[in-house]
Each structure stands twice: as structure tokens, then as C-alpha cells.
């Protein structure tokens, strides 16, 4: 595993998962920078400079850091929405991704979103209907099935955003601030759902901001100066 | 239904569920043909061109189809960038998302072309209706490409739609028989405009114009496919 060169005494990642072969995500020495602006005001912004972390199956791992520290960038690189400048990403199994800002089509209904993603995940009609019915009950938005996204509140959009990431029961789930816009009850229900899935063997990496959540998590990485250190 | 057909159908529904878009699909061709075509001949004369009345009516239908298709092509890319990439990364793949997008765009282009064709045809008739229909669809398909390529590079809705409009204005006002300068040689719709001007006047067109239209349309659609693919593509982890 890659050591943290800038802070050799700080732990960066755990050595390995307790059960060999159950690592669902291993990120090593990830580097990413962005070039912004036009000459002569063009500048390079280095966001990640050697970030490493690991998620095992059956683990709920937190990723914290200040605004702009690179949490969403790291998630997007793992999903494949962004390229990386350096480092390695080793991902195993089915992936579920819930982006920070819901990536949805405003004019399509909730049901149409489920149908489109079910096809992308390779679910047949029966599997889709079972999975969707459970998620609609769990997140309590059954009555919005025929609503277009543009007609939904922010919180209900976020429920759909989360449900799309969960409908194929992924082995690795990446959640980028998945509860923004949730009311308190939904927020608590979200954690129950996450803990149930962890117990079922899902590996979950979640971007979190609240100190109060740390005791719900198996491990927490803090992104600081482009590196992930165990907090 | 295959994943591709279902995705394409969803993308078409997404566009057609905007009531203003539907209204504009009818209003813009009608506006161009009924109002703009009446002064297009005079305008061309002022620029040194020689556009005749019936040809002006026909070409205004082509420009209407081009304008609407350019805007639709741009918004097919820019308005759903994040959701398309998420769908591709969920397993559908960038190529299938791109093919679904271009199928939806072509269906919308065919609808726009049909409305644009019907307006002058019902108003005053077209000498060569089949040639005119092909040429109007070529205008639409070429502008799907231009709109999609602009959408792939420009993320802002205002900047992108202004850029599509700039291309369209330059193309329209420097096209065949619009000016005496001969600048039309470089415009992407030159051959489609030649076909449409001839069809409006009831004349056939030389083979070179047909080949030119075919070549530019194929290149434009390939560029659109590449633009849709670039927008939806994911990087391997």
C-alpha cells in the first residue's frame, strides 16, 4: 500500500480488509488537478495529490474535508466521470453512485427514471419492480411515481437520486452528501437503510460533514492538502 | 423493447414535454415562411444577391428547419449532460447513449423538417416537392451536428445558443444567391441551399450538389455522434 510521503507519521489507509478478497475499492496515490481560465490568467489548481483509501465489503466508510478539498472530485474519478492525472483505482463488483447534485432529467417521471436505469443495470421487469417497490416504501415516496422530476421538491428529487443508486443492490455504494434536502425523519431512515445494507455486505463510501455521524462509521478519512488521512 | 429504443424514446419525450418547444416547432417555420420569405428577396438584392420569390419561400423553410434543429441539437447535449453520463456509467455505455441521442435528434429533425416543408407547400406550392423535402431535412441534419458540437464544448445555455445563432446567421446571410461576394462557397449548407433554391423554382439540381449535400450531412451527423459520445463518456477506473 502507498505511504503518505508528506506526513509519514499519519496513518493513510488500513493495511488490508479483515477478510482477504473482500476489498471493493482501493484508491492509491490519486492525483488530479484542473486548469482554469485563459492566458494570461490561466492557473493550475491541484485538488488531489496522492490520496489513498480503501473500502471493504460490509464497511461504512466516511470521507470528510473542507469545501473544495476534493471529496466530490475523488468520487467522480472512482465512478469514471472524471479522468485522473495519476494513481490507481481498483474497483470490484457492481457500483452504485449517488451524486451530490441530482443528475436527472427534469421532464421525465420517477417511473421513467427507474425504467431507464433498470435497463442500464441489466435488471429485468420483475427484478426492477421488486426493487423499486421496496425503495419507494423505504424512502416513502410511492405517491410520486408518475410525477415528473420538475414537479418534485428538492428532498424528493434527492430520494430518487439515492434510489437510482440502490436499485440494483450494488456491492460498492458511493454516496456524495446523499441526504441534503432530507427532513429529519428521512435523514434517520437513510442511516437505517445504510446500516442494513452494510450488514448485508455492501461496502459504502459516504461524503459526510457532520461530526455526529462519525460514530455511525467504521472508518473516516479526512481529505487535507490533497491527501486522505485516517481521522 | 431494447434499451436503445427505450432510451431514445425517453429522450424524445423529454423534448416534446416542453409546451413552449412544441409551440415553437410550429410557430418558427410559419413565421419564417409567411413573414420572412416575403422580404428575403429584397434583402438578398440589397446584399447583391439574386434570390427569386419562390426560391426565397423555399429556402426560408430550410433556414427555419436549420435554426430549430441547431437549438434542439445544442440542448440535447447541454441540458442533460450530467444525467446522460450517469446513465452511461450505470452500464448503458457512452456509445449507446450517443446513438439514442442522435436517434432522438433525427426524429425531432424530421418533425421540424415536415412542419417547415408543409408551410410553403400549403401556402404557394413547391415546384419540386421531393427535392425540397430532402434539402430541408439536410438543413436540419447539418444543424443537429452544429448544435451538438457547440453543446459539447460550451456548457453555458446562453453562450451556446448565441454561438449556434451566430453560425446560423453567417451561414444564412452568406449563402448562395444571398450575396454577390461568393462567400457562400465555404458555408456548410451551400449545396442544400442550391438544391432548395432550384426545387423552389421547379428545377432539378446537378449531381455534384446532391453529392455535396450527402457528404456534408454524413460529416455533420458523424460530428453529432462524436459530440454526444464525448459528453456521455466515462473513464475506466
Image (cartoon, coloured by chain):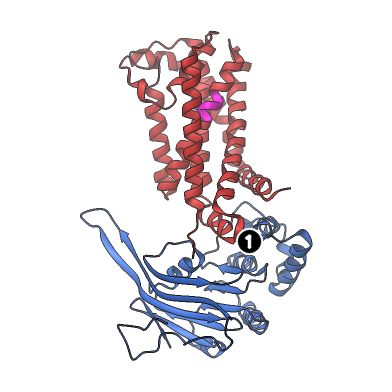
Chain colours: A blue, B red
Q: Residue at 44% x, 62% y: name it.
A: A82
Chain letter of disc 1? A
Q: What's the magenta region? A: B136-140
User: In the rendered structure, does residue A190 fall within the stretch colored magenta?
Assistant: no
Classify B61 as above or below A24: above
Residue B76 percent across, percent down from the top left? 53, 45
In the rendered view, does B19 fall on the left or right side of A84? Answer: right
Classify A220 as above or below A147: below
- Confirm whether residue B172 shows in the render: yes
User: In the rendered structure, does residue B138 fall within the stretch colored magenta?
Assistant: yes
Q: Residue at 59% x, 22% y: name it.
A: B117
Outermost residue, left direction?
A40
Classify B111 as above or below A222: above
Q: The residue tagged with tag 1: helix, strand or loop?
A: loop
Q: Main secondary structure of the magenta part?
A: helix
Outermost residue, front direction?
A20
Q: Which quadrant of the rendered structure holds the C terminus of chain A?
A: bottom left
Residue B46 percent across, percent down from the top left? 34, 14
Number of residues whose C-alpha sits closer than 10 Å to that of mark 1, classed few (under 14), some (14–19) or many (20 or more): some
Residue A86 percent across, percent down from the top left? 37, 68
Residue at the disc numbered 1: A152
In this view, the residue in front, B166 or A89, is: A89
Amino acid at each position: 500500500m502507498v505511504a503518505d510521503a508528506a506526513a509519514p507519521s499519519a496513518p493513510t489507509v488500513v493495511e488490508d480488509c479483515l477478510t482477504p478478497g473482500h476489498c471493493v475499492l482501493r484508491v492509491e496515490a490519486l492525483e488530479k488537478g484542473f486548469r482554469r481560465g485563459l492566458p494570461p490568467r490561466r492557473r493550475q489548481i491541484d485538488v488531489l495529490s496522492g490520496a489513498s483509501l480503501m473500502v471493504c465489503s460490509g464497511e461504512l466508510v466516511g470521507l470528510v474535508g473542507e469545501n473544495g478539498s476534493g471529496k466530490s472530485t475523488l468520487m467522480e474519478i472512482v465512478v469514471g466521470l472524471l479522468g485522473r492525472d495519476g494513481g490507481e483505482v481498483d474497483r470490484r463488483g457492481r457500483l452504485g453512485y449517488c451524486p451530490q447534485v441530482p443528475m436527472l432529467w427534469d421532464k421525465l417521471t420517477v417511473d421513467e427514471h427507474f425504467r431507464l436505469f433498470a435497463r442500464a443495470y441489466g435488471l429485468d421487469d420483475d427484478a426492477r419492480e421488486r426493487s423499486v417497490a421496496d425503495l419507494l416504501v423505504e424512502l416513502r415516496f410511492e405517491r410520486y411515481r408518475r410525477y415528473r422530476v420538475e414537479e418534485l421538491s428538492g428532498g424528493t428529487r434527492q430520494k430518487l437520486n439515492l434510489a437510482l443508486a440502490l436499485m440494483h443492490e450494488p456491492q460498492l455504494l458511493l454516496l456524495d452528501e446523499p441526504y441534503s434536502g432530507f427532513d429529519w425523519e428521512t435523514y434517520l431512515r437513510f442511516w437505517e437503510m445504510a446500516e442494513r445494507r452494510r450488514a448485508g455486505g455492501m461496502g459504502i463510501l459516504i461524503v459526510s460533514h457532520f461530526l455526529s455521524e462519525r460514530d455511525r462509521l467504521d472508518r473516516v478519512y479526512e481529505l487535507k492538502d490533497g491527501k486522505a488521512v485516517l481521522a | 423493447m431494447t434499451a436503445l429504443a427505450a432510451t431514445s424514446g425517453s429522450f424524445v419525450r423529454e423534448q416534446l414535454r416542453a409546451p413552449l418547444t412544441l409551440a415553437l416547432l410550429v410557430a418558427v417555420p410559419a413565421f419564417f415562411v409567411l413573414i420572412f420569405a416575403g422580404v428575403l428577396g429584397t434583402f438578398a438584392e440589397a446584399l447583391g444577391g439574386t434570390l427569386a420569390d419562390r426560391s426565397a419561400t423555399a429556402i426560408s423553410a430550410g433556414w427555419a428547419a436549420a435554426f430549430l434543429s441547431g437549438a434542439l441539437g445544442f440542448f440535447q447535449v447541454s441540458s442533460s449532460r450530467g444525467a446522460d453520463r450517469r446513465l452511461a456509467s450505470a452500464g448503458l455505455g457512452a456509445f449507446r447513449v450517443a446513438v439514442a441521442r442522435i436517434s432522438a435528434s433525427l426524429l425531432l429533425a424530421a418533425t421540424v423538417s415536415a412542419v417547415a416543408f408543409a408551410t410553403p407547400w400549403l401556402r404557394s406550392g413547391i415546384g419540386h416537392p421531393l427535392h425540397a423535402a430532402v434539402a430541408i431535412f439536410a438543413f436540419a441534419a447539418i444543424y443537429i451536428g452544429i448544435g451538438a458540437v457547440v453543446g459539447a464544448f460550451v456548457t453555458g445555455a446562453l453562450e451556446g445558443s448565441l454561438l449556434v445563432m451566430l453560425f446560423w446567421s453567417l451561414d444564412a446571410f452568406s449563402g448562395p444567391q444571398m450575396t454577390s461576394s461568393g462567400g457562400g462557397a465555404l458555408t456548410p449548407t451551400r449545396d442544400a441551399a442550391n438544391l432548395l433554391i432550384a426545387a423552389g423554382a421547379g428545377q432539378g439540381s446537378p449531381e455534384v450538389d446532391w453529392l455535396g449535400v450527402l457528404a456534408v450531412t454524413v460529416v455533420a451527423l458523424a460530428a453529432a455522434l462524436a459530440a454526444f459520445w464525448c459528453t456521455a463518456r466515462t473513464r475506466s477506473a
